[in-house]
Amino acid sequence: MQAIYVQILALILLSLGIATALCRRNVFFVLMGVELALNAVNLSIIGFSKTLPGVESVVGQIVPLFTIAVAAAEACVGLAIVILIFRNQDSVDIDNYSNMRG
């Protein structure tokens, strides 16, 4: 498989993830959009490591593992914050969170 196809797929996934994170009002969809964007970056890194000559493929496969670990930690912390806010406001709408400032 050529590298351009992998990068085009990664670009499509990245744009879908960013669009989902920016356009949705539900916090869960925003978190899913961020996860989709991170997975697109992982796909791009793995695609480059498999197709470019001189790039060590092991490094290209280890780096996404660290990204997945960071994304899992981000999802856990984000969901914990959403659960705590839901207990106080009974909603997961992003517009309701602006009232919590200062």
Image (cartoon, rainbow, N blue to C red):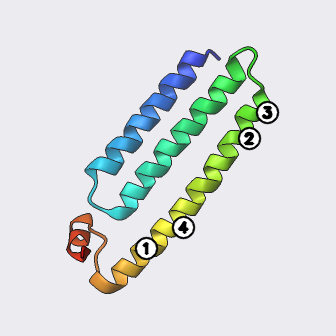
- Which of the two residues, 73 or 27, is positioned nearer the viewer here? 73
Numbered label attached to residue 76: 4
The answer to whether 90 appears left or right of 99 in the picture is right
Q: Give the total of numbered labels.
A: 4
Counting other residues with Cα less than 10 Å from the Cα at mark 3, is it few (<14), some (14-19), or many (20 or more)? few
Q: Which mark is residue 62?
A: 2
For the residues labelled 2 and 3, the Cα–Cα distance comes to 6 Å
Q: Disc 3 marks which amino acid?
A: Val
Q: Earlier in the sequence, mark 1 or mark 2?
A: 2
For badge 4, the amino acid type reads Cys
Q: Is residue 33 left or right of residue 2?
A: left
Circle 1 is placed at which residue position? 81
Spatial CA distance of label 1 from label 3 is 35 Å
Task: Identify the element where label 2 is drawn.
Answer: helix
How busy is the neighbourhood of tag 2: few (under 14 within 10 Å), some, or many (20 plus)? few
Q: Which residue is mark 3?
A: 58
Q: Secondary structure at mark 4?
A: helix
Label whose residue precedes the other's in the sequence (1 or 4): 4
Q: Position of residue 30 (x, y in %)?
A: 37, 56
